[in-house]
Amino acid sequence: MPAQFEDVVVETDLLILGGGMAACGAAVEAAYWAKKHGLKVTLVDKAAVDRSGAVAMGLSAINQYIGLKDGQNTVKDYVEYVRNDLMGITREDLVANIARHVDSTVHLFEKWGLPIWKDEQGNYVHEGRWQLMINGESYKVVVAEAAKNALLQDGVGQIFERVFIVGPLMDGDRCAGAVGFSVRENKFYVFKAKATIVAMGGAVHVFRPRSVGEGLGRAWYPPWNAGSSAYFTIQAGAEMTCQEVRFIPVRFKDAYGPVGAWFLLFKSRATNALGGDYMVERRDELEKWAPYGRVKPIPANLRNWLGMLDVMEGKGPIYMRTEEAIAKIAEQYKDDPKLYQKKMRELENEAWEDFLDMTISQALLWAATNVEPEKKPSEIAPAEPYFIGSHSGASGAWVSGPEDLQTDESRPLYFWGYTNMSTVKGLFCAGDASGASSHKFSSGSCTEGRIAAKSAIKFIVENNTMPNVDEAQVKAWKERIFRPLELFEKHKNETTDPDINPNYIRPRMFMFRLQKIMDEYAGGVSAQFSTNEALLKRALELLGYLKEDSEKLAAENLHELMRCWENIHRMWQAEAHVRSVLFREETRWPGYYFRADKPKMDEENWRVFVNCRWDPKTGEWQMFKRPVIRIFD
Ligand code: SFD
Ligand code: AMP
């Protein structure tokens, strides 16, 4: 089978993996610096850059904007916000580096054509303190266009779409590029590069989703981000961080519509079936999680937790009180009936647009279930867990911070020469791929891509040699990558039902197995997000069997081959997660997961990062702590 796949070898200076917010930011910045140094940049996306990644459907807000120029906030304010929201565990140098540059990225978005809401005075309309409202249906198209223009002008770069990246090429301890395959043509791609930026997003469908049957595949996080960043960096031998810090967004139930605009812009409450407001009635619970339980805004996981307690006590469903929020805003205009009508229409439009801008399926579900938000509340629920280090989770690779933001204490631990370089030489990470720097969102991820690209070009200029790629390594990858096609061809006629075969497992069934393990043993929806040491150990045992069976994944065509590799990527993300949850012997993020056997937060022993590394030479995992160092007092 591999013989039928043409080898395409691409040599480049900088390789950007992914085509999402971070990758597009990297492309724009890299093109600028590459031109100056006569270097070549190559971007590879498994999909089409115009609509790939988390922003595919568009977004209704830019969630990170500091407002430095207008003196609205300081970088330190943002660092404090992120530190508190992550229950004390964050890399302040990384957060601050993004925060001090993010406004300029937002101004670029506007220059490129993204409509940002303005008030009568011409100021941005804020959703909350850090968030700006946008007409964002075409957000990704706008950013993709800028990336393409930057790369394709003057021959500085090239873009490969519909090429699925599988894993890294290595030259000893230096990353030498990547391998992958076209999902449309019989082509095997070998990318050789002096530096590589990983920006392939986070991971979804590692845990069993709430959606089943006809809704299967519907999730909050985009189904096409399947843990490729984590797999790539783990396989390269990079140190990983915060692999236990999953994200559970509370969303409008079943279609996963966003809640931010409701809570922040419309100032809505969420109440239980009895009309009780868990944020008020359960305030005392927050003391157990002090000092973080005392901060404003209350950390996202604690907001989740208070609602979950209601559900566990049988007080569900939980409703977003859309009708109450709209009525309250419109009330100010009640003395002028005409104005009142106008305001009501405006609010109704904004409510629908929020979904139409970024989660169209929620608007469809509202329409299908006769929801008129001004008349009737809507159910919300915590979603299944996702890995998205750029949002309110934190999982990703452990990367170097910028030199100028280090203290004497942090420099030896947080800085190793090139900003955003992982612990592997020449391998840079941004967006969901880099860890411990949460709350980057779309704007911060694009900013971090820019930061990583500038730094990677510096690395290339200072290490301007093409790494050696051993042909045996390439051959071994090729054989492994296409094995599922061979297996299917060889055994497909041995049973009457191609889904059931003693010699192979198809990726869909494999994914169900992975999801069942994670859901039941690692604190998924059906386990009420709760787990313990014994369950986690059992999860590892079952994941071990699954890993053995991954050698028997089979694919009927190229699309299914991609599904096979997506699930292998997910499986490694799952393992890193289970090992990290097991290693951290406390509960720090109730509302994301609860260690029932260690039900308390332990500031003395566990106000640390949990890091891990898989050793490519021995195949062994190492788990260890790294200190959390305060940079901003
Ligand atoms: O409100 C391979 N996010 C929001 N951010 C905001 O600023 N405002 C919002 O309104 C946001 N909302 C939101 C958000 C996310 C999601 C999923 C929803 C709603 C439903 C967060 C941002 O979207 C997020 O932080 C950034 O997009 C992260 O950027 P990045 O670059 O790390 O990931 P990406 O954009 O998803 O891109 C990933 C790329 O990798 C490609 N890829 N390519 C080759 N080979 C492989 N094996 C690959 N695997 C993946 C993808 O195709 C893609 O190009 S709100 O709800 O929070
Ligand atoms: P979401 O739609 O939940 O992703 O939220 C969008 C943005 O608003 C993110 O920055 C969230 O952290 C923030 N956010 C959402 N709900 C709240 C809330 N109740 N209090 C404070 N911030 C919130």
Image (spheres, helix red, strand yellow):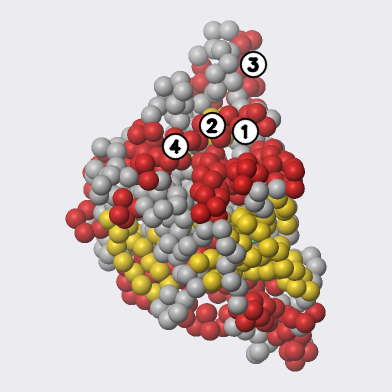
On the image, which quarter does residue 199 sit in?
bottom right
Pinpoint residue 268: horizontal percent, then vertical percent: 47, 31
**What kind of residue is marked 3?**
Lys
Q: Residue at x 30, y 47 (%)?
A: 88
Q: Is residue 328 visible?
A: yes
**What kind of residue is marked 1?**
Phe
Q: Residue at x 71, y 64 (%)?
A: 10
- Which residue is label 3 attached to? 342
**Which mark, residue 99?**
4
* Residue 448 falls left or right of residue 585: right
- Which residue is label 2 attached to? 104
Q: Residue furthest left?
A: 604
Discs 3/2, front: 2
**What kind of residue is marked 2?**
Ser
Q: Is residue 235 visible?
A: no
User: The residue tagged with tag 2: helix, strand or loop?
Assistant: helix
Q: Earlier in the sequence, mark 1 or mark 4?
A: 4
On the image, which quarter does residue 623 sit in?
bottom left
Q: Earlier in the sequence, mark 4 or mark 3?
A: 4
Tell me, yes or no, whether the two marked residues, 3 and 2, touch with CB atoms within 8 Å. Answer: no
User: The residue tagged with tag 1: helix, strand or loop?
Assistant: helix
For the residue with label 4, is its CB less than 8 Å from the closest atom of ligand 2? no
The residue closer to the viewer here, 428 or 542, is: 428
